[in-house]
Amino acid sequence: MRIRIYKSYEMPDLTLLLREGIAIPATAEKQKWEHFKSVMQAELKADLLSKIEAGNGCVFVRL
């Protein structure tokens, strides 16, 4: 399973981590998200993976 990473120019400090095959949440569609990178699950920290699963396949992270 791969995780797609999206960035928004409107909110540069916010990153969207989305499990591949899941649509961008309706609450976030208003912003223009640009695909930044895809990574394998093994490349992410375990706490981020658990947040993605708890968030129904996606999580917003402030960096």
Image (cartoon, rainbow, N blue to C red):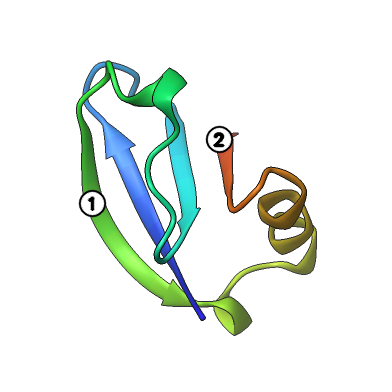
Q: Residue 31: where, in percent of width, then height? A: 27, 20
Q: CA distance from mark 1 to mark 2?
A: 14 Å
Label 1 with label 2: CB-CB less than 8 Å: no
Instruction: Determine the secondary structure under disc 1.
Output: strand
Q: Which residue is mark 2?
A: 60
Which residue is drawn at the image coordinates 38% and 54% (left, top)? 5
Which residue is drawn at the image coordinates 45% and 33% (left, top)? 25
Which residue is drawn at the image coordinates 61% and 70% (left, top)? 44
Residue type at numbered disc 1: His
Q: In the image, which disc is placed on residue 55?
A: none
Check the image and report above or below for 23 versus 45.
above
Neighbourhood count class around disc 1 (C-alpha, 10 Å): few under 14, some 14–19, many 20 upward? few
Check the image and report above or below for 17 versus 59.
below
Neighbourhood count class around disc 2 (C-alpha, 10 Å): few under 14, some 14–19, many 20 upward? some
Which residue is drawn at the image coordinates 55% and 35% (left, top)? 60
Q: Residue 39: where, in percent of width, then height? A: 42, 74
Q: Which residue is mark 1?
A: 35
